[in-house]
Image: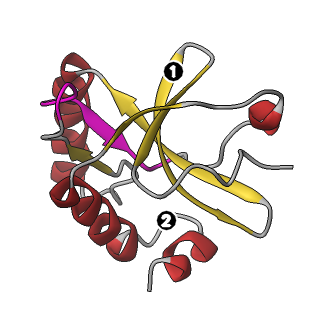
Amino acid sequence: MTCPQLLLPGDIFRHGEKIYVYLATINDITHAALIIAPSQISQIEGVLRLQSNRGSELLFAYVTLTTPPFEKHGAHCGRSTMPNDCDERYVPKIAQLNDEDMQAIVTLIKQSTFLPKALREGFE
Protein backbone atom coordinates (compact mmCIF):
# COMPACT_ATOMS: atom_id res chain seq x y z
CA MET A 1 0.00 0.00 0.00
CA THR A 2 1.14 3.53 -0.67
CA CYS A 3 0.28 7.10 0.17
CA PRO A 4 -2.98 8.25 -1.44
CA GLN A 5 -2.64 9.09 -5.11
CA LEU A 6 -4.36 12.37 -4.35
CA LEU A 7 -0.86 13.71 -3.79
CA LEU A 8 0.92 15.01 -6.86
CA PRO A 9 4.67 15.54 -7.33
CA GLY A 10 5.64 18.66 -5.44
CA ASP A 11 2.84 18.41 -2.86
CA ILE A 12 4.07 19.03 0.68
CA PHE A 13 2.60 16.86 3.44
CA ARG A 14 3.17 15.93 7.08
CA HIS A 15 3.74 12.34 8.16
CA GLY A 16 4.25 11.90 11.87
CA GLU A 17 6.50 14.69 13.11
CA LYS A 18 8.19 15.28 9.75
CA ILE A 19 7.30 17.24 6.63
CA TYR A 20 7.93 15.83 3.15
CA VAL A 21 7.65 16.68 -0.53
CA TYR A 22 5.86 13.95 -2.46
CA LEU A 23 7.95 12.84 -5.44
CA ALA A 24 6.37 9.72 -6.94
CA THR A 25 4.98 6.27 -6.29
CA ILE A 26 6.85 3.69 -8.35
CA ASN A 27 6.27 -0.07 -8.08
CA ASP A 28 4.13 0.48 -4.94
CA ILE A 29 6.96 2.38 -3.22
CA THR A 30 6.29 5.98 -2.24
CA HIS A 31 9.23 8.37 -2.62
CA ALA A 32 9.36 11.72 -0.87
CA ALA A 33 12.00 14.32 0.01
CA LEU A 34 12.35 15.20 3.69
CA ILE A 35 12.16 18.93 4.42
CA ILE A 36 15.05 19.91 6.70
CA ALA A 37 15.65 23.07 8.73
CA PRO A 38 18.14 25.76 7.62
CA SER A 39 20.35 24.90 10.61
CA GLN A 40 20.64 21.31 9.35
CA ILE A 41 21.80 22.58 5.96
CA SER A 42 24.76 24.33 7.61
CA GLN A 43 25.77 21.10 9.34
CA ILE A 44 25.39 19.13 6.11
CA GLU A 45 27.49 21.59 4.13
CA GLY A 46 30.31 21.13 6.65
CA VAL A 47 30.19 17.36 6.21
CA LEU A 48 30.03 17.72 2.42
CA ARG A 49 33.16 19.94 2.46
CA LEU A 50 35.02 17.28 4.47
CA GLN A 51 33.89 14.50 2.12
CA SER A 52 34.87 16.55 -0.91
CA ASN A 53 38.32 17.31 0.51
CA ARG A 54 38.86 13.60 1.14
CA GLY A 55 37.69 12.62 -2.33
CA SER A 56 34.75 10.68 -0.92
CA GLU A 57 31.60 10.15 -2.95
CA LEU A 58 28.92 12.64 -1.89
CA LEU A 59 25.89 10.78 -0.56
CA PHE A 60 23.65 13.64 0.48
CA ALA A 61 21.29 15.15 -2.08
CA TYR A 62 19.30 18.26 -1.22
CA VAL A 63 17.90 21.43 -2.73
CA THR A 64 17.51 24.71 -0.85
CA LEU A 65 13.87 25.75 -1.18
CA THR A 66 12.40 29.13 -2.12
CA THR A 67 8.73 28.15 -1.67
CA PRO A 68 7.00 30.08 1.15
CA PRO A 69 6.89 29.29 4.06
CA PHE A 70 9.83 26.91 3.54
CA GLU A 71 12.35 29.44 2.22
CA LYS A 72 15.93 28.46 3.10
CA HIS A 73 14.81 24.98 4.21
CA GLY A 74 16.21 21.99 2.37
CA ALA A 75 14.48 19.15 0.55
CA HIS A 76 16.64 16.07 1.18
CA CYS A 77 16.19 13.31 -1.39
CA GLY A 78 18.82 10.90 -0.09
CA ARG A 79 16.42 8.62 1.77
CA SER A 80 13.38 9.02 -0.40
CA THR A 81 11.50 5.80 0.44
CA MET A 82 8.60 6.44 2.80
CA PRO A 83 7.87 4.24 5.83
CA ASN A 84 5.46 1.34 5.32
CA ASP A 85 2.86 2.95 7.59
CA CYS A 86 2.44 5.92 5.27
CA ASP A 87 -0.99 4.70 4.13
CA GLU A 88 -2.54 4.22 7.58
CA ARG A 89 -4.57 7.40 7.24
CA TYR A 90 -5.14 10.13 4.73
CA VAL A 91 -2.06 12.31 4.28
CA PRO A 92 -3.34 15.84 3.67
CA LYS A 93 -1.48 18.24 1.43
CA ILE A 94 -0.30 21.29 3.38
CA ALA A 95 1.40 23.22 0.56
CA GLN A 96 2.75 22.93 -3.00
CA LEU A 97 6.33 23.59 -4.13
CA ASN A 98 6.82 26.36 -6.64
CA ASP A 99 7.87 25.33 -10.14
CA GLU A 100 11.51 26.36 -9.65
CA ASP A 101 11.95 24.21 -6.53
CA MET A 102 10.29 21.19 -8.14
CA GLN A 103 12.48 21.53 -11.24
CA ALA A 104 15.58 21.75 -9.03
CA ILE A 105 14.56 18.52 -7.26
CA VAL A 106 13.91 16.76 -10.58
CA THR A 107 17.35 17.84 -11.85
CA LEU A 108 18.98 16.63 -8.62
CA ILE A 109 17.23 13.25 -8.88
CA LYS A 110 18.31 12.77 -12.49
CA GLN A 111 21.96 13.61 -11.66
CA SER A 112 22.29 11.62 -8.41
CA THR A 113 23.71 8.16 -9.07
CA PHE A 114 23.05 6.91 -5.52
CA LEU A 115 19.28 7.53 -5.48
CA PRO A 116 17.03 4.57 -6.37
CA LYS A 117 17.27 3.75 -10.07
CA ALA A 118 13.49 3.46 -10.38
CA LEU A 119 13.10 6.99 -8.99
CA ARG A 120 15.68 8.41 -11.41
CA GLU A 121 14.04 6.63 -14.33
CA GLY A 122 10.62 7.86 -13.21
CA PHE A 123 11.72 11.43 -13.91
CA GLU A 124 13.34 10.80 -17.31
Res. 45 image quadrant = top left
> In the picture, residue 66 is in which quadrant?
top left
Quote the CA–CA distance across marks 1 and 2. Answer: 23 Å
Is residue 44 magenta-colored?
no
Q: How many marks?
A: 2
When the figure is inspected, residue 11 is found, relative to residue 120, above or below; the finding is above
In the foreground, 24 or 111: 24
Please tell me which residue is depicted at 54% across the width and 45% down the height of the picture. Answer: 79
Q: Which residue position holds label 1?
A: 18
Question: Could you say which disc has been placed on residue 114 in the image?
Answer: 2
Amino acid type, mark 1: Lys
Q: Position of residue 6 (x, y in %)?
A: 62, 50
Q: Quadrant of the C terminus?
A: bottom left
Image position of 107 (left or right of 85): left
In what element is the residue under mark 2?
Answer: loop
User: Relative to residue 25, is residue 85 depicted above or below?
Assistant: above
Image x and y of residue 88, in percent: 83, 29
Q: Earlier in the sequence, mark 1 or mark 2?
A: 1
- Residue depicted at 33% across the width and 55% down the height: 58
The segment highlighted magenta reads: 68-78
Q: Main secondary structure of the magenta part?
A: loop
Residue 41, picture quadrant: top left
Magenta stretch contains residue 76: yes
Left or right: 117, with 90 as reference point: left
Query: Which label sits on residue 47?
Result: none
Binning the other alpha carbons within 10 Å of mark 1 as few (below 14), some (14 to 19) or many (20 upward) gives: few
Which three-letter amino acid code belongs to the residue tagged 2? Answer: Phe
Would residue 83 appear left or right of 96 to someone viewing this image?
A: right
> Residue 39 versus residue 82: which sits nearer the camera?
82
